[in-house]
Amino acid sequence: MRRSQISVAVVPSFATSIAQDELKTYDRAEGGGGGRLMTPEDEQNARIREQKYLDLLDAKLEALKAQVSLLCQTGQFSAWLQSLARCTRNTE
């Protein structure tokens, strides 16, 4: 896998992981039973984080589409698909 392909695959998953951790942290703070009410600033920050997460998912989808397109253009799509099938069978 080329360096550009690695970054296309790794960066979105890393950023997604960060966004999910932030959401979990926020959910724990809100659902922790501390009785803390959400301030307008908290709500705005939560909406911003949510939008960033949705934008990240969109970017990840576009990166995957580009990867599939590149594989099709270079004639490697079938081999890639077969390797995924082998990986899936090995993990079951």
Image: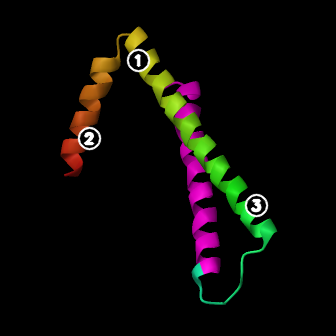
Residue at point 26% right, 40% down? 87
Return the disc, 3 or 2, that comes first in the chain's sequence: 3
At 71% from the left and 85% from the top, the residue drawn is: 36
Q: Main secondary structure of the magenta part?
A: helix
Q: Position of residue 31 (x, y in %)?
A: 58, 81
Q: Does residue 37 sit above or below 87 in this rendering? A: below
Residue 25: x %, y % from top left: 62, 71
In the figure, residue 30 lies in which quadrant? bottom right
Q: Which residue is mark 3?
A: 44
Which residue is situated farthest in the right direction here? 41
Specify whether residue 6 is in view: no
Q: Secondary structure at mark 2?
A: helix
Q: Amino acid at mark 2?
A: Cys
Q: Nearer the viewer, mark 3 or mark 2?
A: 3
Give the answer, above or below, for where 87 lies relative to 41.
above
Q: Which residue has dot 2 on it?
A: 87
Q: CA distance from mark 3 to mark 2?
A: 42 Å
According to the picture, the residue beneath numbered tag 1 turns out to be 71
Amino acid found under the numbered disc labelled 3 = Gln
